[in-house]
Amino acid sequence: MKLLKQLSFLAVASVIFFSSCLSDDSTNFDPNVQFETDLELIEQYKLDNNLTDMIVENGISYRIDSVGPGISPTLSDNIVVKYKGHLLNGNEFDANATGIEFPLSGLIPGWQFGIPKLKDFGGSGTFIIPSAFAYGNRSQGSIPANSVLVFEIILEETVKSVDPVAQLEVDLALIEEYKVDNNLTGMSIEDNISFRIDSVGTGESPILTDNVVVKYKGYTLAGDVFDENTEGENILLSEAIEGWQLAIQDLKGMGGSGTFIMPSGLAYKNRRQGSLGQNAVVIFEITLEEVVK
């Protein structure tokens, strides 16, 4: 039941962040000369590694292996990426194989240039970045000053920035329109969730530390089903999306059931999840089978 889990990406310090706390080696440094030197090194690297078909823009050489099926990010977006970075001599200085989230505006210029050429959900490519678009004449960890960097990058997700207050207003208007169109104007509203309890059920209502066994169907305002379980699944309530944490507590174990319309801020927010788009209002029909203390 992956769709019920809350998403959590931890943005940690990484060498691809453009930092002001770097060692400076500016003695007799000429950026124009260094740029020409970098371009010569890059061309030799491409010859040695059979990469002569790469595209070159602004001194950055790149090859797009897969454009990706999704959307391209802008500087105001966050990105979730897998990547590997190494020097021209092959020494790897950084990598992430599981996916990590960064604000694109906080990354080195070479990434700000390269990442928007990909689309998320699998866009991938290799980027060879002159030192001027990386860390210049400053060392960074194991990266020497004036280093050309090579990155292999997979763009997993583009996370669009959103004003949560404005988005809630949009969501609530969509929900009210949906209720009018589907003769659901008698639903109760609590914590911005519109709901109808079909059966309260018997037994105890769950709390966040409980596990719950549930049957459910989740669908969009357009009626598209994105998740369903008809056999009963055991989940820890504290790990479910916030809308579920609020909704389930209105039911009791052994047969409590209802329909809940949740604004995106209580569901998956500005994250795309499976077939759901960003900022999606979601509807869940839920039957609470058991509360496991």
Image: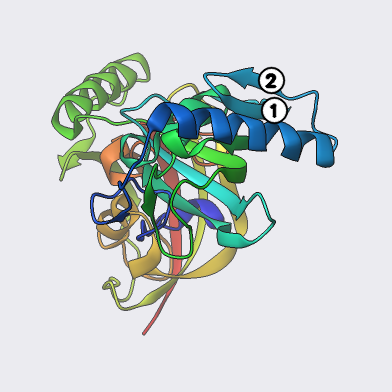
Q: Residue lying farthest bottom?
A: 293
Residue 85 seen in the current view = yes
Return the residue at label 1: 64
Distance from disc 1 to disc 2, alpha carbons, whole Å, reads 9 Å
Residue 125 seen in the current view = no
The image quarter containing residue 66 is: top right
| Badge 1 amino acid | Ile
Q: Residue at x 61, y 36 (%)?
A: 128
Query: Quick check: marks 1 and 2 in contact, CB under 8 Å?
Result: yes
Relative horizontal placement of residue 38, taking residue 10 as reference (left or right):
right
The image quarter containing residue 104 is: top left
Q: Residue at x 48, y 58 (%)?
A: 143
Q: Which mark is residue 56?
A: none
Q: Residue at x 16, y 25 (%)?
A: 166
Note whether 279 is above or below 135 in the view shown.
above
Return the residue at label 2: 55
Q: Nearer the viewer, residue 71 or 163?
A: 71
Q: Residue lying farthest front?
A: 28
Q: Position of residue 135 (x, y in %)?
A: 39, 45
Q: Position of residue 213 (x, y in %)?
A: 48, 69
